[in-house]
Amino acid sequence: MPSVAAEEVDFGVLENWVGFQLRMAQSASFQAFARLSHQSGMRPGRFATLYLIGRNPGISQTALSRANGKDKSSLTPVLNDLVRRGFVHRARTRNDRRTYRLTLTPDGRKLLDQLNRCAQRHDRNLDRLIGRRDVPRFLEILRKIATEIA
Amino acid sequence: MPSVAAEEVDFGVLENWVGFQLRMAQSASFQAFARLSHQSGMRPGRFATLYLIGRNPGISQTALSRANGKDKSSLTPVLNDLVRRGFVHRARTRNDRRTYRLTLTPDGRKLLDQLNRCAQRHDRNLDRLIGRRDVPRFLEILRKIATEIA
DNA sequence: AGCGGATAGTTTGATATAAAACGAATGCGC
DNA sequence: GCGCATTCGTTTTATATCAAACTATCCGCT
């Protein structure tokens, strides 16, 4: 009747399952980034959102949600908040009055610059951990999983 | 004034950032597994929980939450549900009356077998996508990120 | 024109998750 | 024994997320 301590947990096949280790790695990376970006008074999910808007001025919410891998309904409260705080501008398009054109305000661009520095530091840590030489192949596999998994 | 369609989104450096691609890959893998395990009437997060209990009978909730990479408070409602539905047995220990000993019931073991089949299929898909030869190195990197990221 | 299907975004309802505060129990150091 | 820091699990509070239903709008076809 073994009493299980944290250090001696038996992971069995989980140790060699990509699905599980992918989740654990993502979770750890996410938390590390959250710690870094905490100081900017910004939550971790915001960075990619702001970056994609900055990179694609006039993007619609649906396109943004797809690019970001989240459901479009998740985006509504996030954008409400970013608009309310003056980081994002949301304007109806002339031709199609269903869609919004999203752009960064000057404040939004400043905030993005801050977050960019956190993200750069974070990703340098990851690169160092993986080893520069293996990064391209690793990224290739991640992209393949993201796009081709059934 | 370019109107941005989903297919032509510019990802900029995100394309080559491990943190971002890790999230996208995990998200896609998670959704694929959710589709597979859907038929078992079970949500995706449950599998690792049941597996770890089955593999480590008598494990405490705190040890389980750590092994699973989730906060212990997340576990309370999950275990309440699994206990209520008769898949997990929760008993106080004699020596330390703060901790629970978690074990699978026979029904829990049956359910785990079902989910195991889904998970196996899912992970075979991932292995095929990655390419058998590259799986060990890929796993090694994921484990390294999970354990060593600051 | 006008109908019907498709699309953009929001709302609603359900689940998952973390963080902090909490109560109970433990055990170390004296 | 006693006191206090620690640990275990729960509760509370705040987000994040998805899926499905909904509204408004658009567009193709007749």
Image: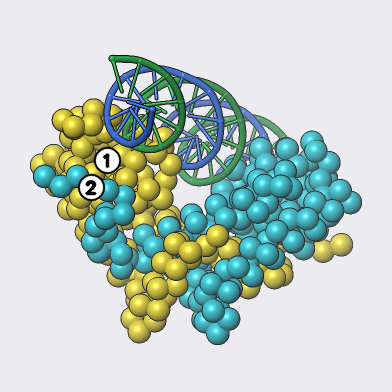
Chain colours: A yellow, B cyan, C green, D blue
Which chain is mark 2 on?
B
Quadrant holding the C terminus of chain B: bottom left
Can residue B140 be seen by looking at this rendering?
A: no
Marks 2 and 1: CB-CB under 8 Å?
A: yes
**Above/below status of A15 relative to A91:** below
Instruction: Classify residue B83 as left or right of residue B123.
Output: right
Q: In the rendered image, which residue does mark 1 sit on? A: A60
Q: Position of residue D12 (x, y in %)?
A: 54, 26
Q: Is residue B101 left or right of residue B49?
A: right
Q: Is residue B56 left or right of residue A28?
A: right
Task: Tell whether A118 sits left or right of A14.
Answer: left
Give the farthest residue toward the right: B106
Residue A33 in sight from this viewpoint: yes
Residue at image point 52% right, 75% down? B130
Residue picked out by circle 2: B4
How crowded pointer 1 is (Cα within 10 Å; few <14, some 14-19, many 20+) is rated as many
